[in-house]
Image (cartoon, coloured by chain):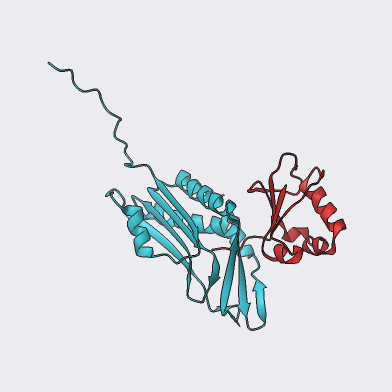
């Protein structure tokens, strides 16, 4: 699955996009995997109240299932306009 | 004698189908040209309300020398289209235009344009405000401001969530 990061999440992870193969059943489970894997992710996902999720380009929650998902994105609350 | 011609499609009270124009672009836009595009070829529009957002040169007393706007290609366009469609479902709109820029923007630069066309001004004004309130809380854009102390990501404002919540 393609995992995308935007704004300060992109800066903390050090990449805007990466391919991740994982058996994590949910977004939250994947976040735990990533946090344990590397300090960069631990820093990016330090405060989940400041992180929003999109699954296949639709707004989603952390308990969203990952089965069949092609694109997952993490980003801060939006600030356009 | 020839039979009378069968009736063609019944004339619609609202005229041509409503048009949604969404663009996420680096380039600047021309507000007059966008109003012309929205109203071209039709005489049933009574009101066009527009909102234009600009880059300020200060934020909370801190000078801002510019900003960088990041977005989520693909999701951004879909989100803006969904917001325009939600406005059309709520008000009798004949057209909705949403243009949002990304990339580096200098103070005074135009960031966003919303234009709503309707037979009467009330719906046009309200719809433009609704589109902006939803855009600010749902469209995946992020601003990074350049200040004398360095660049910083803009924090989302609670007031924007409250503004969007009042339309529910």
Indicate left or right for A53 with B162 as reference.
Answer: right
In this picture, is B67 found above or below B128? below
Image coordinates of residue B25 in percent, x first then y, are 49, 61
To which quarter of the image does residue B147 belong? bottom right
Q: Quadrant of the N terminus of chain B?
A: top left
Q: Which is nearer the eye, B48 or A5?
A: A5
Front residue of this view, candidates B32 and B11: B32
The picture places residue A27, in percent across and down from the top left corner, at 77, 48
- What color does chain A have in the rendering? red
Q: Position of residue B123 (x, y in %)?
A: 41, 52
Total marks placed: 0
**Extreme residue toward the top, this view:** B1
Considering only vertical position in the picture, is B6 above or below B135? above
Residue in view at x 64 percent, y 63 percent: B158
The quadrant in which residue B143 appears is bottom right
**Spot occupied by residue B166 in the image (x, y as percentages of width and height):** 56, 54
In-image side of A9 versus B33 (left or right): right
Farthest residue, direction left: B1
Q: Residue furthest bottom?
A: B148
Who's the residue at 74% across and 44% down the image?
A64
**Residue at 79% over, 47% down:** A21
Kindly indicate which chain is depicted in cyan in the rendered structure.
B
Query: In terms of image quadrants, where is residue B115?
Result: bottom left
Instruction: Please state which of residues A75 and B159 is positioned toward the viewer in this rendering.
Output: A75
């Amino acid at each position: 699955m393609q995992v995308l990061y935007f704004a300060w999440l992109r800066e903390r992870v050090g990449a805007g996009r990466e391919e991740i193969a994982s058996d994590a059943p949910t977004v939250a489970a994947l976040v735990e995997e990533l946090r344990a894997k590397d300090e960069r992710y631990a820093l990016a996902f330090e405060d989940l109240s400041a992180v929003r999720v999109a699954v296949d380009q639709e707004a989603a929650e952390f308990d969203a299932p990952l089965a069949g998902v092609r694109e997952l994105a993490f980003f801060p609350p939006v600030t356009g306009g | 004698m020839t039979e009378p011609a069968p009736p063609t499609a019944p004339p619609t009270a609202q005229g041509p189908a409503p048009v949604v124009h969404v663009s996420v672009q680096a380039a600047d836009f021309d507000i007059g040209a966008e109003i012309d595009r929205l109203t071209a070829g039709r005489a049933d529009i009574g009101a066009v309300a527009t909102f234009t957002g600009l880059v300020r040169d200060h934020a909370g007393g801190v000078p801002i020398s510019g900003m960088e706007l990041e977005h989520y290609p693909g999701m951004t366009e879909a989100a803006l289209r969904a917001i325009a469609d939600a406005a059309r479902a709520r008000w009798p709109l004949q057209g909705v235009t949403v243009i949002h820029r990304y990339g580096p923007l200098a103070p005074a630069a135009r960031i966003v344009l919303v234009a709503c066309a309707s037979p009467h001004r009330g719906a046009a004004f309200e719809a433009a405000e609704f589109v902006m309130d939803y855009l600010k809380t749902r469209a995946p854009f992020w601003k990074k401001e350049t200040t004398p102390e360095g660049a910083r990501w803009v924090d989302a404002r609670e007031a924007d969530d409250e503004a969007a919540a009042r339309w529910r």
